[in-house]
Amino acid sequence: MFEGFEVVEFPPIEGFIPKGRKGFVYVISWERDTLDVPFYVGETGWLLGRMKDYGVRSFAASTDFRVGECIRYLKEMKKYQINVRYKGSSDRKAEREREEGDIIEELHLSGALLLNHFRGYSYRVDDKTKEKKRLQIFCEALIRLKDPGPLHST
């Protein structure tokens, strides 16, 4: 499924320059031992900028906050390694979105639980603390489905 993808640990090291063209598709996953569990698929015209946005986790940017919070929770609280698989794609957004959709579909058919289809929020209406809690519940469900080992206790 991930033929042609490069892998980098999140956050990328200082000076990281992605291999590829202007556009990218990517899959974010958590890893422990032999498990590597995808939880988000994306596309972007600027991979490094997108990764920085996930690190900032601005509540006003729903996707950045949601993905960034899951990364933070899985990495800092659960001590999982976070990987970003990426590959060069078209510089045309419509083509990248099609490729992103194909990857999402393939992962769904393989049984993956993805943040892509988890309900978003409105930063003007919804509460940041409640949204963090919802995302933690998503992460715990993801862990229960894929990692039955003892390391995932809260």
Image (spheres, rainbow, N blue to C red):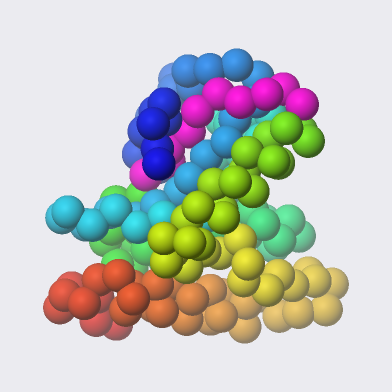
One can see residue 148 in this view: yes
Residue at position x 35%, y 39% in the image: 9
Residue at position x 49%, y 76% in the image: 138
Query: x, y percentage for residue 37?
Result: 35, 57
Query: x, y percentage for residue 137?
Result: 47, 81
Occupied quadrant, residue 154: bottom left
Residue at position x 68%, y 34% in the image: 96
Image-based side of 65 in relation to 133, left or right: right
Looking at the rendering, in which quadrant would you find the N terminus? top left
One can see residue 39 in this view: no
Image-based side of 13 in relation to 50, left or right: left
Give the camera-side residue of 135 and 106: 106
Secondary structure mostly seen in magenta is: strand
Q: Is residue 48 above or below residue 143?
A: above
Give the camera-side residue of 91 and 138: 91
Could you tell me how many numbered marks the image carries? 0
Question: Magenta residues, as a range?
Answer: 83-92
> Is 5 one of the magenta-colored residues?
no
Give the camera-side residue of 103 and 69: 103
The residue sitting at the right extreme is 124
Query: x, y percentage for residue 23?
Result: 65, 25
Q: Is residue 133 above or below residue 102?
A: below
Query: x, y percentage for residue 52?
Result: 57, 39
Residue at position x 37%, y 63% in the image: 74
> Is 88 one of the magenta-colored residues?
yes
